[in-house]
Image (spheres, rainbow, N blue to C red):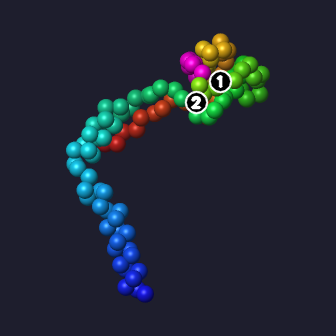
Amino acid sequence: MRARRLSVLAATAAAVALPVISAPAATAAAHTAVASENCHKEGPWKIGTSAVRIHSKPSSKSTVVGVLYQGHKWSHGKTHGSWVHVKDKTTGVSGWASMSYVYPIIYTCLD
């Protein structure tokens, strides 16, 4: 029983290590260069859910003036705490959206 367990562990370790060992060094270098190129840059803003409420003020207790759907064209402006001012270009509605749902893509350094 113990011999079988050892053989299974050895086979699993070999299967996991195989892609790492066989990957060409140039592939790893190319990914590092791309990541370094985008290091410390803020990417495009994104809606992290299917729809976000647009409020009249930067507060969840303020009046909801519209809904920003993921497929709509929109722009962002200034921020206030955890809120960002958005304009839904599809409907023309503007107001504040929570940055829990609307946020920039942040690139991370891998060096």
Image position of 79 (left or right of 59): left
**Which residue is the site of mark 1?**
68
Instruction: Indicate the amino acid at tag 2.
Output: Ile
Q: Quadrant of residue 86?
A: top right
Give yes or no for residue 75 being in the magenta stretch. Answer: yes
Specify the quadrant that holds the C terminus: top left
Observer able to see residue 83 = no
Magenta part of the chain: 72-80
Seen at 48% across and 32% down, the residue is 105
Q: Is residue 75 visible?
A: yes
> Could you tell me if the residues under marks 1 and 2 are in contact, i.e. CB atoms within 8 Å?
yes
Q: Which residue is mark 2?
A: 47
On whether residue 102 falls in the magenta region, the answer is no
What amino acid type should be assigned to the residue bearing mark 1?
Leu
Q: Quadrant of the N terminus?
A: bottom left
Percent coordinates x, y for residue 7 in the rendering: 35, 78
| Residue at image location 66% in from the left, 30% down from the top | 51
Where does the image place residue 10, in percent across and percent down from the top left?
A: 34, 74
Closest to the observer: 6 or 105? 6
